């Protein structure tokens, strides 16, 4: 059924599926000054991206990618107040892969490269409950609202998303809001041409709840932070300098700008970790196949030739993995040098450092020794076989010579 949108000042009231009651409408109507009069803003963090893929084109302009993502968002009745800002640097994006890359696997994907996406999203309570049930989270949604403001920022390291529950009722979880928005867009963002796709990295949100209020902070600082770690997600409470900011909206814009680079680095490390896990998993599968037991002599003869080829491929793939790991570690080391630069903000250094410390290390040296053992054993078997054949040929030649003399 067609959704009906009702605009009241700057806030939009949506009647989803034509079945929401009039009391719901009354609950959603608010003044245009609602954002600026809130005493506190809460938000959750995630990595959302609108990726682009067109197997028929080798290159694409960023503006075309941005327009395709915008058009697909505008087609969603639940999306309102959409604002986009294109990249400051126009350039041609070359797509040189045969298969569509996946952000979830840590692949770099083609994205709109927009400086920002901002939009409101309306998700009724009953839909939220269904999304949580479908996602099998085991917990009921506690977003405290049916309306969300989504901010997506492009950073040097990649996209970062912020989900802000609008006018939440009582106690609520911004991280639950992230999950609701993620599952809603995952199920409803559909490009008819199949080129634009909503992707997430995680899938869980950043493990912290963010809050912002205006107040008094030490001179010279724009924000102060109180970080606590109750059971579950960390709690970050920012206070914006009320002498520098005259509204929470202005303070929020500045805070998101300040946090984005640090969060972008956090998600870049997360993506590199996903790459390493995926590649190591593939190597593990190859090793399992190579070392599987031989059941019968017939099976051994059949597999012998294939096993020799598999060993060669595996050693080459292990070398490629070690090279890729070296590049990943180098990138992380380089970015880490700038992590504690006060000019770039240090509020989330603890979280980024934690992600870097947890970057996995794999036993490539030990596996390499095992493969080298199999390689050497195979070479020795070949050398032995050659020696035996040579000896037999020599004996046969001698016998023939003796027969000829007689």
Image (cartoon, rainbow, N blue to C red):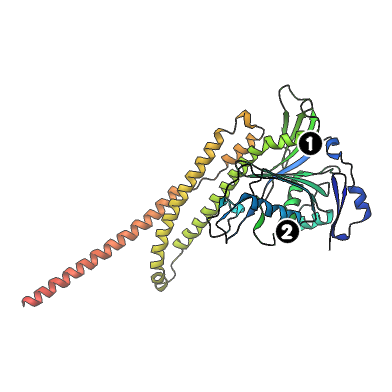
Q: Is residue 161 above or below residue 288?
A: above
Looking at the rendered structure, the number of numbered marks drawn on it comes to 2
Quarter occupied by residue 210 = top right
Marks 2, 1: nearer the viewer: 1
Nearest the eye: 184 or 234 = 184
Residue in the picture at 38% in, 67% down: 305
Q: Can the viewer see residue 363 in this picture? A: no
Q: Can the viewer see residue 52 in this picture? A: yes
Residues packed near mark 2 inside 10 Å, few (<14), some (14 to 19) or many (20 plus): few
Q: Which mark is residue 97?
A: none
Quarter occupied by residue 78 = bottom right
Mark 2 lies on residue: 187
Q: Which residue in the rendered view is the most extreme toward the top?
A: 219
Separation of residues labelled 2 and 1 (CA atoms): 30 Å
The quadrant the N terminus occupies is bottom right
Mark 1 lies on residue: 249
Q: Position of residue 401 (x, y in %)?
A: 10, 73
* Residue 403 falls left or right of residue 55: left
Q: Position of residue 84 (x, y in %)?
A: 71, 46
Contact, mark 2 vs mark 1 (Cβ under 8 Å): no
Residue in the picture at 70% in, 62% down: 192
Nearest the eye: 67 or 334 = 67
The quadrant the C terminus occupies is bottom left
Q: Position of residue 172 (x, y in %)?
A: 81, 44
- The numbered mark, 2 or 1, whose residue comes first in the sequence reads 2
Secondary structure beneath dot 1 equals helix
Nearest the eye: 391 or 336 = 336
Q: Position of residue 100 (x, y in %)?
A: 58, 58
* Residue 299 falls left or right of residue 144: left
Secondary structure beneath dot 2 equals helix
Q: Which residue in the rendered view is the most extreme toward the left?
A: 406
Q: Is residue 234 above or below residue 137?
A: above
């Amino acid at each position: 059924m067609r959704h009906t949108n009702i605009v009241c000042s700057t806030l939009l009231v949506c009647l989803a599926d034509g079945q929401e009651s009039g009391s719901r409408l009354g609950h959603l109507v608010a003044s245009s000054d609602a954002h600026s009069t809130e005493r506190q803003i809460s938000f959750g963090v995630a990595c959302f991206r609108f990726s682009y893929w067109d197997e028929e084109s080798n290159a694409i302009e960023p503006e075309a990618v941005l327009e395709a993502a915008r058009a697909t968002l505008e087609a969603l009745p639940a999306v309102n107040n959409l604002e986009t800002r294109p990249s400051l640097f126009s350039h041609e994006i070359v797509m040189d892969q045969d298969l569509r890359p996946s952000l979830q696997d840590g692949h770099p994907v083609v994205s709109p490269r927009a400086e920002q996406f901002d939009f409101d999203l309306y998700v009724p309570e009953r839909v939220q409950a269904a999304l949580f049930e479908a996602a099998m989270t085991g917990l009921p949604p506690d977003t405290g609202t049916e309306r969300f403001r989504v901010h997506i920022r492009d950073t040097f390291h990649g996209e970062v998303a912020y989900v802000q529950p609008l006018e939440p009722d009582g106690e609520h979880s911004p991280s639950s809001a992230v999950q609701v928005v993620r599952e809603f867009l995952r199920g409803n963002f559909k490009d008819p041409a199949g080129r634009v796709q909503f992707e997430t990295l995680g899938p869980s949100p950043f493990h912290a709840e963010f809050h912002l209020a205006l107040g008094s902070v030490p001179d010279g600082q724009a924000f102060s932070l109180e970080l606590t770690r109750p059971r579950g997600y960390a709690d970050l409470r920012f206070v914006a300098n009320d002498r520098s900011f005259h509204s929470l909206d202005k303070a929020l814009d500045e805070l998101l700008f300040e946090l984005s680079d640090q969060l972008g680095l956090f998600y870049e490390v997360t993506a590199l970790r996903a790459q390493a896990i995926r590649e190591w998993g593939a190597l593990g599968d190859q090793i399992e196949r190579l070392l599987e037991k031989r059941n019968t002599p017939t099976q051994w003869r059949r597999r012998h030739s294939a096993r020799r080829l598999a060993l060669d491929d595996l050693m080459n793939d292990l070398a490629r993995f070690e090279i890729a790991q070296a590049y990943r570690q180098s990138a992380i080391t380089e970015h880490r040098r700038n992590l504690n630069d006060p000019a770039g903000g240090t509020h989330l250094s603890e979280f980024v450092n934690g992600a870097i410390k947890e970057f996995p290390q794999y036993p490539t040296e030990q596996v390499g020794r095992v493969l080298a053992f199999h390689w050497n054993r195979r070479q020795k078997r070949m050398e032995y076989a050659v020696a035996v054949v040579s000896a037999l040929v020599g004996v046969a030649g001698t016998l023939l010579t003796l027969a000829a003399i007689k």
